[in-house]
Each structure stands twice: as structure tokens, then as C-alpha cells.
Image: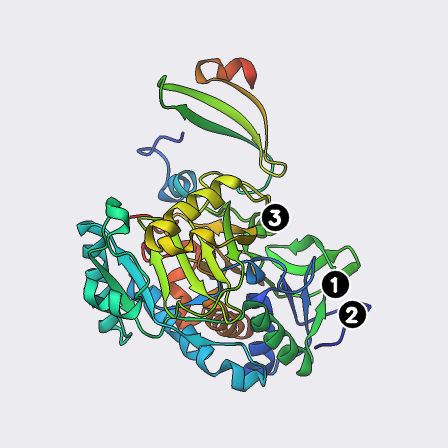
């Protein structure tokens, strides 16, 4: 995340609003309500298939 | 309905990507209003195969922001004369549009919308339970005592139209005036030199052009990537379904944001129903049982007598969503690249106004007055147009 106090309004707006909307494998944040667990789901948005899931704590190992 | 040229020409004055309602309407108005006829509309599938043929065909202008109301009102006025203009029956049918309120907060938003609408000269009024029951006698106002209806926003000009005929009418009209429609033609790249558009690459060869209009709805991120443009657009599916045809009983268009439901009865007698966006990004037009079940449950709360009626077909379309629920239209920082996108769940009703304003924008290389608030640059300037009156938005 860019530092909002240091970057220009333009760079900040790009961070806040713009997205990579193309199809592909997205790293989505999912929340399991009953256990209060955040996890990452790697989702193929063309085939609608989940490739793998892991706890958000393990994000770095999986990327 | 129109000629099918087998070859692309070497050069066009304008190339329109996307042969849906919006792209074809832009071609039509470019030819009719601006005399620009050396135009190619490139469609990777068949015309109207995307959002144009997948929406629930509702036309209305009772939005929340002045910018939105002004734009959609322009569209509804164009729609009213379109069948005569095309000499093609669009089955444009004014039904009256009810947005039901089940909570005080929903009613408050509707009061706000009614006041904005009236101020902009659009017929829109808050009505009580007795009025709703009179116009829609079959409705269960108490919704099985789950979430009773307490009032509604009533918009008499709300209408439905045969959506694919809108694409055919615009396509034929554009073609008669000289524009070419190339189906099964996929754009594979856009040539940009010194931040100016110089050509379009397709599966049928290269085209020289200095003006490209992207009107591809749920496929916008593919196209904007070709010119290196970043946008806030993410794509979510929006599902819909129809029942078997039954005798006419529902004249009005009924929407309930709390129930994530909208329904109208087509001229064939089918109930055409939609719900809210699927909650995650997806570029597939698959259908889900979850959608059909959830929607049916809410339909039965409003209209319990439908319990024996079968759902015949369901489908999905791709919605290019923006953070403020307003479209992205007009010029961009790439010279000669014009964008007509961010049509989310509200694109069909916008077809005529979008075609007309984008044609003027492309012809004059200057954003049409009506669409200035919708330029892509609004995000960089933090001037969003918060349009909470958009369909299938819970608030």
C-alpha cells in the first residue's frame, strides 16, 4: 500500500479505485463465519474452480 | 436484417468493438446524426449475444442522482419513439414500476428518490399499501408476515421492451446507412503509437483507424488492457430466469431490493425474474441452483399462488461493476480510444442514450454534455457519482 501522506492524489486514487479486472486466478479473501477464520482461496474466474485454499497466515509460503 | 460482409476493409473512420445494443446504437447515431458511415462494428459472437440479450428488459429513469436521472430520462424518451423510427415492433410496453419498501430506511431512500425525480421532471411518487394492492391485487402485502410491505416508489413510465429487437433495430438502421457489422470477429489487439490509436488487430486481419469505441460491457477489462488503461471495473455475474408462460395477470414491474428480486410478465406470458449480483468476481455465464432457490423463495413470499409454476430457463450475464454504480463513458487519456463501459446491472435501459451520447462524443472528439460526470477521470479527481438507485443494489 502506498503511503497516503507521501504519494500524489493520482497515485493514491489508482490504489483506492483501480483493479485488475481481467479474468485469471484471483487471490480472494474468504471468511468462515462460525470459526472466525480468514483464509485465501485461489479462484480461477474463467472456469469457476478453486485451485487451493490456505490460511492467511500462510500467505507468504504459498505465493 | 442486415448484410454480412465477408471481408474487413483496410481502413475505417471508426471501429466499434462490441455488437450489442450500445455498440450498434452508437453506429446508428454516428451515421444518422453525424454522417459518419465508414464504420465497422466488430462482434466476437453474434449481435446481442452478451448483456443485450441477457438482461430482464426493464426501462426506467427513477434514479437517485441528478446526473443519473437526467441521463436515463433521455434514454426513456428515445425508447418511446424507437419502434416507429425503426419500423420494427420492440413490444415497448409501459407498465408502471414499483420499488417496494419493507423497512423505514428503504422508504426514506424512496422519498429521496421521488423528490430528486420530481425535481428533474420525472414522474415518480411514493405510494401506500392500498395503492399497491389496487394495482397488484395478487400481491401478499404482508409477505407471509416476514417483512411486510410498508409502501413503494411508483414510477408510471417504467416499461419493458424486447431486448434483442433493440439490437436488431439499431443494427439494421446502422447498416442501411452504410455501417458494416462483422460478427464472429474477435479483436486481439489495439495498436497505439505516441498515446494515439492507429489500428485494431482482429482474427480476420489488421484495420487502420484513429477512433475506437469499446462497448463490450462485461469484457471491458480485456479491451482496456490492450491500450494500457487502468479502470476500477470488476466483473460479476448477474443471473436471471423465466417461468413457463401463464395467463396475463401481472401488469406492473415489481422490484424489492430487500428481497433481491425483480419481476415482470412478458408479452408471451412468462414471468421474467432477476435477483442481485453474485457476490464474487467471475467471468463465466454459468447458472446456480442457489440463485433459482433463493429467488423462488422470495417470489413465493410476494406471490404465494405461484407455487405450482415451473421455472423454464435460467442464465447469467457478465456485469462490469464500478465502485459508484455509475457507468464509465467518454474520452480517455489514450487519444482516439473512447470507452462506454461500467454498465453493471443498468445497461439495457441506457442503450439509446448511450448510443446517442457516445456517437456525439466520438464524432466531435469531445465528451457529450450529458455524460461529462461519467468520465473515467472522475476517480482520479475523487468525484464519484454515487448511484444507489441502481438495480439489485441492497441499501
**Marks 2/3: CA distance?**
24 Å
Does any portion of residue B173 appear in the rendered image?
yes
Q: How many residues crowd mark 1 within 10 Å: few (<14), some (14–19), many (20+)?
A: many
Query: With respect to residue B214, does B91 lie above or below?
Result: below
| Residue B6 as seen in the image, left or right of residue B14 | right
Name the quadrant of the N terminus of chain B: bottom right
- Numbered disc 2: secondary structure: loop
- Numbered disc 1: secondary structure: strand
- Name the spot of residue B380 as percent of width and height, x first: 39, 49
Query: What residue is rendered at 59% in x and 51% in y?
Result: B219
Chain for disc number 3: B
Query: What residue is rendered at 39% in x and 31% in y?
Result: A2
Chain for disc number 2: B
Q: Earlier in the sequence, mark 1 or mark 3?
A: 1
- Name the spot of residue B180 as percent of width and height, x first: 71, 73
Say which residue label 2 marks.
Answer: B9
- Numbered disc 3: secondary structure: helix
Say which residue label 3 marks.
Answer: B222
Kindly indicate whether the residue at mark 2 contacts the one at mark 1 (C-beta within 8 angstroms).
yes
- Name the spot of residue A40 as percent of width and height, x first: 48, 23
Say which residue label 1 marks.
Answer: B207
Does any portion of residue B63 appear in the rendered image?
no
- The picture quadrant where one finds residue B328 is bottom left
Residue nearest the viewer, comparing B338 with A52: A52
Q: How many residues crowd mark 3 within 10 Å: few (<14), some (14–19), many (20+)?
A: some
Amino acid at each position: 500500500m502506498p503511503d497516503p501522506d507521501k504519494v500524489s492524489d493520482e497515485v493514491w486514487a489508482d490504489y483506492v479505485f483501480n483493479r485488475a479486472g481481467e479474468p485469471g486466478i484471483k487471490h480472494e479473501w474468504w471468511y468462515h463465519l462460525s470459526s472466525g477464520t480468514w483464509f485465501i482461496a485461489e479462484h480461477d474466474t474463467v472456469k469457476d474452480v478453486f485451485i487451493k485454499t490456505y490460511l492467511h497466515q500462510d500467505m507468504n509460503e504459498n505465493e | 436484417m442486415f448484410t454480412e460482409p465477408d471481408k474487413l476493409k483496410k481502413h475505417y473512420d471508426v471501429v466499434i468493438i462490441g455488437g450489442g445494443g450500445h455498440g450498434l446504437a452508437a453506429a446508428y447515431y454516428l451515421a444518422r446524426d453525424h454522417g459518419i458511415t465508414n464504420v465497422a462494428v466488430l462482434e466476437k459472437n453474434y449481435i446481442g449475444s452478451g448483456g443485450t440479450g441477457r438482461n430482464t428488459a426493464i426501462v426506467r429513469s427513477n434514479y437517485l442522482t441528478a446526473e443519473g436521472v437526467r441521463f436515463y430520462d433521455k434514454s426513456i424518451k428515445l425508447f418511446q419513439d424507437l419502434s416507429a423510427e425503426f419500423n420494427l415492433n420492440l413490444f415497448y410496453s409501459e407498465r408502471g414500476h414499483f420499488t417496494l419498501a419493507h423497512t423505514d430506511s428503504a422508504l426514506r431512500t424512496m422519498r429521496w428518490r421521488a423528490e430528486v425525480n420530481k425535481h428533474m421532471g420525472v414522474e415518480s411518487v411514493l405510494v401506500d399499501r392500498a395503492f399497491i394492492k389496487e394495482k397488484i391485487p395478487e400481491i401478499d402485502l404482508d409477505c407471509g408476515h416476514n417483512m411486510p410491505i410498508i409502501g413503494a416508489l411508483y414510477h408510471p413510465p417504467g416499461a419493458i421492451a424486447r431486448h434483442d429487437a433493440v439490437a436488431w433495430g439499431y443494427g439494421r438502421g446502422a447498416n442501411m446507412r452504410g455501417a458494416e457489422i462483422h460478427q464472429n470477429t474477435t479483436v486481439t489487439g489495439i495498436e497505439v503509437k505516441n498515446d494515439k490509436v492507429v489500428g485494431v488487430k482482429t482474427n480476420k486481419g489488421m484495420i487502420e483507424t484513429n477512433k475506437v469505441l469499446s462497448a463490450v460491457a462485461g469484457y471491458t477489462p480485456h479491451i482496456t488492457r490492450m491500450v494500457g488503461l487502468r479502470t476500477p471495473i470488476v466483473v460479476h455475474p448477474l443471473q436471471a430466469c423465466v417461468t413457463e408462460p401463464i395467463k396475463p395477470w401481472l401488469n406492473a414491474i415489481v422490484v424489492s431490493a430487500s428481497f433481491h428480486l425483480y419481476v415482470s410478465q412478458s408479452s408471451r406470458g412468462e414471468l421474467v425474474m432477476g435477483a442481485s449480483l453474485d457476490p464474487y468476481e467471475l467471468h463465466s455465464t454459468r447458472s446456480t441452483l442457489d440463485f433459482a432457490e433463493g429467488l423462488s423463495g422470495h417470489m413465493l413470499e410476494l406471490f404465494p399462488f405461484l407455487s405450482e409454476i415451473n421455472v423454464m430457463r435460467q442464465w447469467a450475464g457478465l456485469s462490469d461493476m464500478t465502485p459508484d454504480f455509475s457507468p464509465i463513458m467518454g474520452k480517455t487519456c489514450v487519444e482516439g480510444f473512447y470507452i462506454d463501459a461500467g454498465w453493471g446491472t443498468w445497461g439495457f435501459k441506457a442503450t439509446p442514450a448511450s448510443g446517442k451520447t457516445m456517437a456525439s462524443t466520438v464524432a466531435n472528439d469531445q465528451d457529450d454534455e450529458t455524460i461529462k460526470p461519467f468520465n473515467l477521470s472522475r476517480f482520479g479527481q475523487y468525484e464519484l457519482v454515487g448511484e444507489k438507485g441502481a438495480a439489485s443494489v441492497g441499501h
